[in-house]
């Protein structure tokens, strides 16, 4: 029998003390003895017992049935009636409160303990069912929202591809080379956005299934960041990414050495796939929410134990009220509703940062731009036996 706490609501002092002794002998904790509805409700609120033993005739202007009704409605704590009244009217009123037991006085200790154990077991089972039903409802809502958002986001680039290919097919021979290049770039951009959306969807599915793994490997972070900028910038319409690597230590040198020191050192170890998800989503968001031509600063720095990525834009910013929910799946800031997007990016970023056991911070205000700072600890486990270290 598991330990549980019980509130006794009984205005007959001798009976209450006798019940308390029986419960304590059986291993239960008695949090309090209440004699009225007011005392009972205050005890439930302040002490949160696992179960309430409720006499129907108690002091005050409310009886035990009315008190049990309020406890059930406000606190979802199981109530077992312990009373000498068995008339039809009292039974009908008690049934409406959906009690977990009804014991008539006088009673045996064994009967009391058995009823309490059954009530606690039933309450636990019902709570588990309610949790499962709530999770199923949330999952169904998530699936519905997922299908709606993804369908909408796929439709836009598909329409752009269809429109551009139709124009090239009909008027390709009459169009100037520069115009054809515009339509081809539009197609390429749409394909890239669809590819990113698919990547985000698959990553989210892996996350929900618990299959998104952290697999660190040696990385030349400076080269990776430069490659990402070269990869993203020519294909995204909007701001210019300014990549800086202030204080970033040369990857071919030991951590903490100057460029003049020539002894080699192992590369820092991070998960390249997860890191690409982090940086691509943050950079793409900065471009998306910035005015064309505004600079985006992408900075890389490191120390002996960690590496830090800072991505700062001068875009529309994020209202303070939205900060707490930014990393929830499908959540979008209140001032971004008219800009295409799924609300998946930052959720995926947070998951990837967490798998690195890193941190992500945001500084932003509406109309004043946004700064994301990601700090990831460096995996040095493979360095210990490296002869170059």
Image (cartoon, helix red, strand yellow):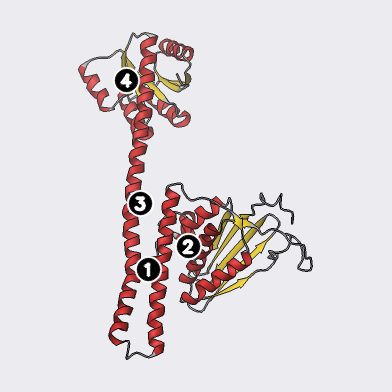
Q: CA distance from mark 4 to mark 1?
A: 55 Å
In this rendered view, identify the residue nearer to me: 235 or 57. Answer: 235
Residue for badge 4: 101
Q: CA distance from mark 2 to mark 1?
A: 15 Å
Q: In the drawing, what numbered circle is on residue 254?
A: none
Residue for badge 1: 338
Judged left or right of residue 11, residue 250 is right
Q: Give the quarter of the figure containing the N terminus.
A: top left
Dot placed on the residue nearer the N-terminal end, 3 or 1: 3
Label 4–label 1 contact, CB within 8 A: no
In percent of the image, x 79 and y 68: which residue is there? Answer: 260
Dot placed on the residue nearer the N-terminal end, 3 or 4: 4
Image location (x, y in percent) of residue 264: 74, 62
Image location (x, y in percent) of residue 165: 32, 79
Q: Single out the mark in the foreground, 3 or 4.
A: 3
For residue 160, above or below residue 385: below
In percent of the image, x 46 and y 21: which residue is there? Answer: 2
In percent of the image, x 38 and y 19: which residue is there? Answer: 116
Residue for badge 2: 319
Name the secondary structure under disc 4: strand
């Amino acid at each position: 029998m598991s330990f549980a706490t019980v509130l006794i609501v009984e205005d007959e002092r001798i009976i209450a003390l006798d019940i308390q002794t029986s419960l304590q002998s059986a291993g239960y904790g008695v949090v309090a003895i209440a004699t009225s509805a007011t005392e009972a409700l205050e005890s439930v609120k302040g002490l949160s017992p696992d179960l309430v033993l409720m006499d129907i005739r108690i002091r005050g202007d409310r009886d035990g049935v009315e008190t049990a009704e309020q406890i059930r409605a406000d606190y979802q704590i199981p109530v077992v009636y312990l009373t000498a009244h068995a008339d039809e009217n009292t039974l009908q009123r008690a049934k409406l409160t959906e009690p977990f037991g009804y014991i008539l006085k006088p009673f045996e200790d064994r009967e009391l303990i058995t009823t309490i154990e059954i009530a606690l077991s039933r309450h636990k089972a019902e709570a588990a069912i309610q949790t499962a039903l709530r999770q199923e409802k949330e999952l169904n809502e998530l699936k519905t929202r997922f299908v709606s958002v993804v369908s909408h986001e796929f439709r836009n680039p598909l329409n752009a591809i269809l429109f551009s290919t139709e124009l090239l097919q009909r008027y390709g021979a009459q169009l100037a080379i520069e115009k054809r290049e515009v339509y081809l770039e539009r197609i390429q951009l749409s394909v890239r956005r669809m590819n990113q959306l698919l990547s985000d969807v698959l990553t989210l599915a892996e996350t929900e299934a618990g299959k998104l793994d952290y697999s660190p490997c040696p990385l030349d972070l400076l080269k990776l960041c430069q490659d990402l900028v070269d990869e993203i910038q020519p294909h995204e319409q909007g701001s210019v990414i300014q990549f800086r690597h202030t204080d970033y230590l040369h990857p071919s040198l030991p951590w903490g050495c100057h460029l003049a020191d020539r002894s080699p050192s192992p590369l820092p170890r991070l998960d390249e796939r997860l890191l690409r998800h982090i940086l691509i989503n943050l950079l793409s968001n900065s471009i998306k929410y910035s005015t064309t031509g505004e600079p985006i600063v992408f900075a890389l720095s490191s120390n002996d134990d960690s590496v830090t990525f800072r991505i700062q834009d001068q875009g529309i910013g994020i209202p303070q009220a939205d900060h707490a929910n930014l990393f929830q799946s499908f959540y979008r800031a209140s001032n971004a509703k008219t800009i295409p997007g799924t609300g998946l990016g930052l959720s995926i970023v947070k998951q990837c940062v967490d798998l690195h056991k890193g941190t992500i911070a945001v500084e932003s205000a509406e109309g004043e731009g946004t700064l994301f700072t990601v700090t990831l600890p460096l995996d040095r486990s493979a360095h210990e036996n490296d002869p170059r270290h």
